[in-house]
Protein backbone atom coordinates (compact mmCIF):
# COMPACT_ATOMS: atom_id res chain seq x y z
CA UNK A 1 0.00 0.00 0.00
CA UNK A 2 0.96 3.64 -0.46
CA UNK A 3 3.09 4.98 2.41
CA UNK A 4 0.29 7.04 3.95
CA UNK A 5 -1.84 3.91 4.46
CA UNK A 6 0.88 2.23 6.53
CA UNK A 7 1.49 2.87 10.22
CA UNK A 8 4.22 5.23 11.34
CA UNK A 9 5.91 2.23 13.01
CA UNK A 10 5.95 0.23 9.76
CA UNK A 11 7.36 3.19 7.92
CA UNK A 12 10.07 3.77 10.54
CA UNK A 13 11.55 0.36 9.73
CA UNK A 14 11.97 1.22 6.05
CA UNK A 15 13.81 4.50 6.55
CA UNK A 16 17.61 4.40 6.52
CA UNK A 17 18.08 8.10 7.30
CA UNK A 18 18.53 8.40 11.10
CA UNK A 19 16.50 11.61 11.45
CA UNK A 20 13.53 10.29 9.46
CA UNK A 21 13.60 7.00 11.35
CA UNK A 22 13.80 8.73 14.72
CA UNK A 23 10.95 11.07 13.84
CA UNK A 24 8.65 8.20 12.79
CA UNK A 25 9.55 6.23 15.93
CA UNK A 26 8.89 9.27 18.12
CA UNK A 27 5.51 9.85 16.46
CA UNK A 28 4.51 6.25 17.15
CA UNK A 29 5.85 6.21 20.73
CA UNK A 30 4.13 9.46 21.73
CA UNK A 31 1.06 8.98 19.55
CA UNK A 32 1.64 12.48 18.26
CA UNK A 33 2.01 13.76 14.71
CA UNK A 34 2.05 17.32 16.05
CA UNK A 35 4.93 19.73 15.47
CA UNK A 36 4.68 23.03 17.32
CA UNK A 37 6.25 26.09 15.71
CA UNK A 38 7.48 28.36 18.50
CA UNK A 39 7.78 31.73 16.78
CA UNK A 40 8.55 34.00 19.74
CA UNK A 41 11.41 36.47 20.16
CA UNK A 42 12.54 36.00 23.78
CA UNK A 43 14.53 33.04 25.10
CA UNK A 44 12.43 32.75 28.24
CA UNK A 45 9.14 32.56 26.33
CA UNK A 46 10.63 30.12 23.85
CA UNK A 47 11.80 27.71 26.56
CA UNK A 48 8.64 28.05 28.68
CA UNK A 49 6.34 27.27 25.73
CA UNK A 50 8.44 24.28 24.68
CA UNK A 51 8.39 22.90 28.23
CA UNK A 52 4.59 23.24 28.28
CA UNK A 53 3.90 21.66 24.87
CA UNK A 54 6.76 19.12 25.06
CA UNK A 55 4.68 16.13 26.20
CA UNK A 56 2.30 16.51 23.24
CA UNK A 57 4.69 16.89 20.32
CA UNK A 58 6.96 14.77 18.14
CA UNK A 59 8.91 17.75 16.84
CA UNK A 60 9.56 21.38 17.70
CA UNK A 61 10.01 23.82 14.83
CA UNK A 62 12.25 26.81 15.37
CA UNK A 63 13.14 30.08 13.64
CA UNK A 64 16.27 30.53 15.73
CA UNK A 65 17.14 33.88 14.06
CA UNK A 66 14.09 35.65 15.51
CA UNK A 67 15.34 35.27 19.11
CA UNK A 68 16.50 38.75 20.19
CA UNK A 69 18.46 37.70 23.27
CA UNK A 70 20.03 34.60 21.73
CA UNK A 71 23.14 33.13 23.24
CA UNK A 72 24.58 29.65 22.69
CA UNK A 73 23.34 28.36 26.06
CA UNK A 74 19.83 28.47 24.55
CA UNK A 75 20.79 25.50 22.42
CA UNK A 76 21.86 23.55 25.52
CA UNK A 77 18.50 24.29 27.17
CA UNK A 78 16.65 23.30 23.98
CA UNK A 79 18.58 20.04 23.85
CA UNK A 80 17.74 19.32 27.50
CA UNK A 81 14.04 19.87 26.78
CA UNK A 82 14.21 17.60 23.73
CA UNK A 83 15.59 14.83 25.95
CA UNK A 84 13.21 15.52 28.84
CA UNK A 85 10.12 15.39 26.62
CA UNK A 86 11.34 13.09 23.83
CA UNK A 87 10.94 15.23 20.71
CA UNK A 88 13.14 16.12 17.73
CA UNK A 89 14.17 19.57 16.49
CA UNK A 90 13.47 21.15 13.10
CA UNK A 91 15.07 24.51 12.30
CA UNK A 92 12.85 26.03 9.60
CA UNK A 93 15.81 27.79 7.95
CA UNK A 94 14.55 27.62 4.35
CA UNK A 95 18.02 27.66 2.82
CA UNK A 96 17.95 29.11 -0.69
CA UNK A 97 21.51 29.77 -1.98
CA UNK A 98 24.24 27.95 -3.88
CA UNK A 99 25.72 24.80 -2.37
CA UNK A 100 28.94 26.34 -1.08
CA UNK A 101 27.08 29.15 0.72
CA UNK A 102 24.39 26.99 2.30
CA UNK A 103 27.04 24.56 3.58
CA UNK A 104 28.58 27.49 5.48
CA UNK A 105 25.22 28.82 6.66
CA UNK A 106 24.27 25.35 7.90
CA UNK A 107 27.54 24.54 9.70
CA UNK A 108 28.80 27.92 10.87
CA UNK A 109 27.84 31.46 11.88
CA UNK A 110 26.15 32.26 15.17
CA UNK A 111 23.70 29.36 15.10
CA UNK A 112 25.64 26.28 13.85
CA UNK A 113 22.28 24.78 12.88
CA UNK A 114 23.64 21.40 11.77
CA UNK A 115 25.04 20.74 15.24
CA UNK A 116 21.61 20.68 16.92
CA UNK A 117 18.77 20.53 14.38
CA UNK A 118 17.82 16.99 13.35
CA UNK A 119 15.88 18.24 10.35
CA UNK A 120 16.08 21.40 8.28
CA UNK A 121 14.62 22.54 4.96
CA UNK A 122 15.57 24.21 1.71
CA UNK A 123 13.96 25.85 -1.28
CA UNK A 124 14.77 23.92 -4.46
CA UNK A 125 15.08 27.17 -6.45
CA UNK A 126 18.94 27.10 -6.75
CA UNK A 127 18.90 23.55 -8.20
CA UNK A 128 20.39 20.28 -6.88
CA UNK A 129 23.65 21.92 -5.74
CA UNK A 130 21.78 23.14 -2.67
CA UNK A 131 21.20 19.52 -1.66
CA UNK A 132 24.87 18.59 -2.25
CA UNK A 133 26.01 21.54 -0.16
CA UNK A 134 23.72 20.79 2.77
CA UNK A 135 24.39 17.05 2.54
CA UNK A 136 28.14 17.62 2.77
CA UNK A 137 27.52 18.97 6.28
CA UNK A 138 24.38 17.14 7.39
CA UNK A 139 24.84 13.59 6.16
CA UNK A 140 27.86 12.76 8.33
CA UNK A 141 25.82 13.99 11.33
CA UNK A 142 22.77 11.85 10.46
CA UNK A 143 20.59 14.86 9.65
CA UNK A 144 17.67 14.98 7.22
CA UNK A 145 16.47 17.57 4.73
CA UNK A 146 12.99 18.57 3.62
CA UNK A 147 12.46 20.33 0.30
CA UNK A 148 9.80 23.01 0.05
CA UNK A 149 7.67 21.56 -2.74
CA UNK A 150 4.63 23.68 -1.85
CA UNK A 151 3.77 26.46 0.59
CA UNK A 152 0.69 27.38 2.60
CA UNK A 153 0.53 31.07 1.77
CA UNK A 154 -1.79 32.68 -0.74
CA UNK A 155 -0.26 33.37 -4.16
CA UNK A 156 2.93 31.36 -3.58
CA UNK A 157 4.85 30.30 -6.68
CA UNK A 158 5.65 26.73 -5.59
CA UNK A 159 3.07 25.09 -7.87
CA UNK A 160 2.85 23.02 -11.04
CA UNK A 161 6.17 22.41 -12.80
CA UNK A 162 8.12 23.91 -9.86
CA UNK A 163 6.58 21.38 -7.45
CA UNK A 164 7.28 18.57 -9.93
CA UNK A 165 10.95 19.60 -10.20
CA UNK A 166 11.21 19.69 -6.40
CA UNK A 167 9.86 16.14 -6.22
CA UNK A 168 12.29 15.07 -8.94
CA UNK A 169 15.21 16.56 -7.00
CA UNK A 170 14.13 14.65 -3.90
CA UNK A 171 13.79 11.39 -5.83
CA UNK A 172 17.37 11.70 -7.04
CA UNK A 173 18.75 12.48 -3.53
CA UNK A 174 16.97 9.98 -1.32
CA UNK A 175 19.90 9.48 1.05
CA UNK A 176 19.56 13.00 2.48
CA UNK A 177 16.17 14.33 1.36
CA UNK A 178 13.66 12.65 3.66
CA UNK A 179 10.54 14.54 2.69
CA UNK A 180 8.76 17.73 1.83
CA UNK A 181 7.06 20.77 3.12
CA UNK A 182 3.89 20.33 1.10
CA UNK A 183 0.12 20.53 1.36
CA UNK A 184 -0.59 16.96 0.15
CA UNK A 185 1.18 13.69 -0.70
CA UNK A 186 3.64 13.88 -3.54
CA UNK A 187 3.68 10.24 -4.83
CA UNK A 188 1.39 11.10 -7.72
CA UNK A 189 3.41 14.11 -8.84
CA UNK A 190 4.84 13.19 -12.26
CA UNK A 191 8.60 13.19 -12.45
CA UNK A 192 10.53 14.39 -15.55
CA UNK A 193 12.63 11.18 -15.52
CA UNK A 194 10.65 7.98 -14.96
CA UNK A 195 13.79 5.99 -14.12
CA UNK A 196 13.95 7.55 -10.65
CA UNK A 197 10.44 6.44 -9.66
CA UNK A 198 10.32 3.95 -6.78
CA UNK A 199 7.06 2.08 -6.18
CA UNK A 200 7.79 2.08 -2.43
CA UNK A 201 8.50 5.81 -2.25
CA UNK A 202 8.01 7.11 1.28
CA UNK A 203 8.77 10.78 1.69
CA UNK A 204 7.55 12.43 4.88
CA UNK A 205 5.13 15.30 4.31
CA UNK A 206 5.21 18.02 6.97
CA UNK A 207 2.47 20.58 6.59
CA UNK A 208 2.18 24.12 7.98
CA UNK A 209 -0.93 26.26 7.72
CA UNK A 210 -2.91 24.29 10.30
CA UNK A 211 -5.53 25.88 12.55
CA UNK A 212 -8.88 24.92 14.03
CA UNK A 213 -10.31 28.32 14.89
CA UNK A 214 -9.42 30.72 12.07
CA UNK A 215 -9.04 30.46 8.29
CA UNK A 216 -5.99 32.68 7.83
CA UNK A 217 -4.16 35.84 8.85
CA UNK A 218 -3.79 39.35 7.40
CA UNK A 219 -0.58 38.44 5.52
CA UNK A 220 -1.72 35.58 3.32
CA UNK A 221 -1.40 32.60 5.65
CA UNK A 222 -4.12 30.01 4.97
CA UNK A 223 -5.23 27.41 7.53
CA UNK A 224 -6.75 23.98 7.16
CA UNK A 225 -7.83 21.62 9.93
CA UNK A 226 -5.79 18.61 11.08
CA UNK A 227 -8.45 16.37 9.51
CA UNK A 228 -8.18 18.08 6.13
CA UNK A 229 -4.39 17.86 6.25
CA UNK A 230 -3.88 14.33 7.64
CA UNK A 231 -7.01 12.43 6.61
CA UNK A 232 -8.00 14.12 3.35
CA UNK A 233 -4.57 15.16 2.03
CA UNK A 234 -2.49 12.29 3.49
CA UNK A 235 0.15 14.47 5.16
CA UNK A 236 2.25 13.04 8.00
CA UNK A 237 2.94 15.87 10.46
CA UNK A 238 0.84 18.93 11.25
CA UNK A 239 2.75 22.11 12.03
CA UNK A 240 0.89 24.50 14.31
CA UNK A 241 2.16 27.88 15.50
CA UNK A 242 -0.13 30.65 16.68
CA UNK A 243 -3.04 28.24 17.11
CA UNK A 244 -1.11 26.82 20.08
CA UNK A 245 1.47 29.25 21.46
CA UNK A 246 -0.68 32.30 20.75
CA UNK A 247 -3.35 31.34 23.26
CA UNK A 248 -2.11 33.11 26.37
CA UNK A 249 -1.68 31.31 29.68
CA UNK A 250 0.43 28.17 30.03
CA UNK A 251 -2.72 26.21 30.89
CA UNK A 252 -4.40 27.35 27.69
CA UNK A 253 -1.29 26.62 25.58
CA UNK A 254 -1.16 23.16 27.11
CA UNK A 255 -4.86 22.59 26.42
CA UNK A 256 -4.44 23.63 22.78
CA UNK A 257 -1.42 21.35 22.31
CA UNK A 258 -3.40 18.42 23.65
CA UNK A 259 -6.35 19.39 21.42
CA UNK A 260 -4.25 19.46 18.23
CA UNK A 261 -2.43 16.26 19.19
CA UNK A 262 -5.74 14.47 19.61
CA UNK A 263 -7.17 15.82 16.35
CA UNK A 264 -4.06 14.95 14.37
CA UNK A 265 -3.85 11.45 15.82
CA UNK A 266 -7.54 10.67 15.29
CA UNK A 267 -7.24 11.78 11.66
CA UNK A 268 -4.25 9.43 11.21
CA UNK A 269 -6.04 6.49 12.83
CA UNK A 270 -9.03 7.02 10.55
CA UNK A 271 -6.73 7.23 7.55
CA UNK A 272 -4.91 3.95 8.14
CA UNK A 273 -8.14 2.10 8.95
CA UNK A 274 -9.89 3.00 5.68
F1 LIG B 1 7.03 26.58 4.48
C1 LIG B 1 6.15 27.18 5.25
C2 LIG B 1 4.88 27.50 4.73
O1 LIG B 1 4.56 27.23 3.56
N1 LIG B 1 4.00 28.08 5.57
C3 LIG B 1 4.31 28.38 6.86
O2 LIG B 1 3.46 28.90 7.57
C4 LIG B 1 6.44 27.46 6.56
N2 LIG B 1 5.54 28.06 7.36
C5 LIG B 1 5.95 28.30 8.76
O3 LIG B 1 5.05 27.63 9.63
C6 LIG B 1 5.97 29.75 9.17
O4 LIG B 1 7.26 30.29 8.98
C7 LIG B 1 5.60 29.68 10.65
O5 LIG B 1 6.76 29.47 11.43
C8 LIG B 1 4.72 28.45 10.75
C9 LIG B 1 3.23 28.70 10.72
O6 LIG B 1 2.84 29.45 11.83
P1 LIG B 1 1.30 29.75 12.17
O7 LIG B 1 1.39 30.64 13.35
O8 LIG B 1 0.66 28.41 12.48
O9 LIG B 1 0.68 30.40 10.98
Image (cartoon, rainbow, N blue to C red):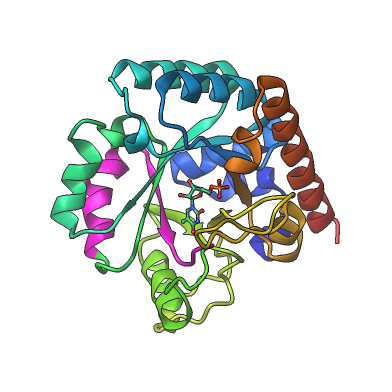
Q: In the rendered image, which quarter is residue 131 located in? A: bottom left
Q: Is residue 78 above or below residue 182?
A: above
Q: Quadrant of the C terminus?
A: bottom right
| Residue sitting at x 47%, y 77% | 159
Residue 179 drawn at (x, y percent): 48, 56
Residue 52 drawn at (x, y percent): 62, 21
Q: Is residue 264 above or below residue 108?
A: below
| Residue sitting at x 82%, y 46% | 266
Residue 137 in magenta stretch: yes
Residue 199 in magenta stretch: no
Residue 40 drawn at (x, y percent): 46, 33
| Residue sitting at x 21%, y 59% | 97
Q: Is residue 9 above or below residue 188?
A: above
User: 56 or 223, which lies in front?
Assistant: 223
Q: Quadrant of the N terminus?
A: bottom right
Residue 263 drawn at (x, y percent): 78, 45
Most extreme residue toward the left is: 100
83 left or right, relative to 132? right
User: 214 or 8, which lies in front?
Assistant: 214
- Magenta-drawn segment: 129-152
181 left or right, relative to 25? left
User: 47 or 32, which lies in front?
Assistant: 47
125 left or right, relative to 15? left
Asked whether residue 196 appears in the rendered view, the answer is no
Amino acid sequence: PSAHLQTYAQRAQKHANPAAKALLETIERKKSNLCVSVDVTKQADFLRIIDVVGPYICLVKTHIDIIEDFDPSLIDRLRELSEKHDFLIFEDRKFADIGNTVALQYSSGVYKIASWSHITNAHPVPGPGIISGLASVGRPLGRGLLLLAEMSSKGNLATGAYTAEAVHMARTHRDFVVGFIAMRRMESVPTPDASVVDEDEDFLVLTPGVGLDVKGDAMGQQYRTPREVVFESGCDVIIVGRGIYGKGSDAEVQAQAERYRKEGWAAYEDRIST
